[in-house]
Amino acid sequence: MRITGYRTLITVHRWGRPIGDANGSTPSGVTAVPLVLLETDAGITGIGLGSHSGLDDVYPAIDGEDPRGVGALYDRMLARVFKAGHAGSTFGAIGAFDMALWDLKAKAAETPLWRLLGARDHVVPGYASGLDSPLDDAGLTALHSRFRDRGFRAVKLKGGLDRERDLHRLHLLRTFYAEADGGRAPRLMLDANECWSRKEAIAFVARIEESLDLAWIEEPVRRWDVEGHSMVTRAVRAAVATGENLTGLEQVRPLVQAGAVDVVQTGSVWGITHFLRVATLAHAFDLPVSPVAYNANPLAHAAASVPNHLATEVQDLSFPVGVHADQDFEDGNIILGESPGLGLVVDEDAVAALVLSPDGATTAGPHVRPERAGKRLLVQEGHLRLANRVAG
């Protein structure tokens, strides 16, 4: 079996609500989902989800190759761009091809990827996370009623810009979940998406920990700030989770070696091989690993196979237009099916039928760093809320 070419498609995910975090929001609740279809002379097509930018740069490394040699092909793609560097969108292109390669390998073996990777079970623990910053109280509880009904008992909120609002929302969800679970409180997490300075992070979390416990605080400072993460880890009770925006083992290793991270994360858009290698690195230091979500939860297959998987983020209970995923959600878990590969089927007719207005979807997402990020030591909460309203 040899790789003969690739095609790209763009579909959309309809969230049914505004989504966002500390770095911005998408009021329409419609986001673009790039798909990569990797073709072979055996008539089998591999599906990858992720960046289209940089695909032409790395494709020559896998053109004409047997897709079953995934690990070697991953390294060939890295080598192809070693001089210019593989960070950012280039790493996303490698991840999209890598995902498609693993899909092909498992399809050729006529087995689901989780089984090919050696997992004993197809049940993957998850936690609920709804990209919820734009939602008011009613919208927040409406969203989490769906997660709660599927048995989720660990919850992550987006926050970091308004301490009192974050406290209110955390307590709201604590009560909301406890009411349905005999008074037992859920595990709560807060994601600041790198919007704090070191001292802001410590003060912010300390205030929250006066009235409730956090399972973890996510991305409290800039992704590359090893010393800053170490400071936060030592100063707060909560675990510190980070790593979703790090591209390559060389970026993750300094945090792990310095004891600056308690929960090692990887972004789903970076691919299967990156997750497996980061999970092995984390396991060597007795650290858990947790994938950050993306459409159709592709890393759940790999998560099922590693011994130190903690929980996989679940951002929505539905899938992009024209994409069917052989998985379900029960008792707070992702239940993977028996379909070969990643269990994904793309209805190209449904994707082709999409008609988008110019602002109907965005590939960039809400990722514009706030102007005052890391500079709010002297800003009062009320003034900050006013500034956010003006900026929005």
Image (cartoon, helix red, strand yellow):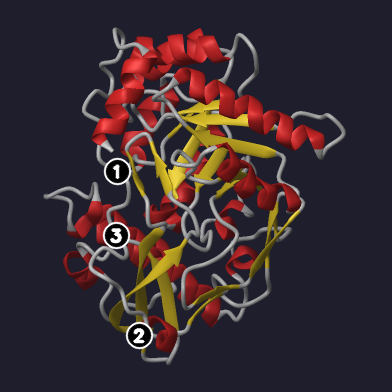
Give the side of residue 152 with respect to residue 265, left or right. Answer: right
Reading the image, the residue beneath label 1 is 367
Query: Looking at the picture, does residue 173 appear above or below residue 225?
Result: below
Name the residue type under label 3. Answer: Thr
The residue depicted at 68 percent of the width and 64 percent of the height is: 328
Q: Name the residue under label 3.
A: 362
What kind of element bears circle 2? Answer: helix
Q: Nearer the viewer, residue 17 or 201?
A: 17
Q: Quadrant of residue 45?
A: bottom left
Do callouts 3 and 1 mark residues in contact (Cβ within 8 Å)? no
Tags 2 and 1 touching, CB below 8 Å: no
Q: Which mark is residue 291?
A: none
Dot 3: few (<14), some (14–19), or many (≥20) neighbours within 10 Å?
A: some
Looking at the image, residue 130 sits to the left or right of residue 85; the answer is: right
Q: Is residue 240 visible?
A: no
Nearest to the observer: residue 314 or residue 178: 178
Write the residue at 56% across / 45% down: 139
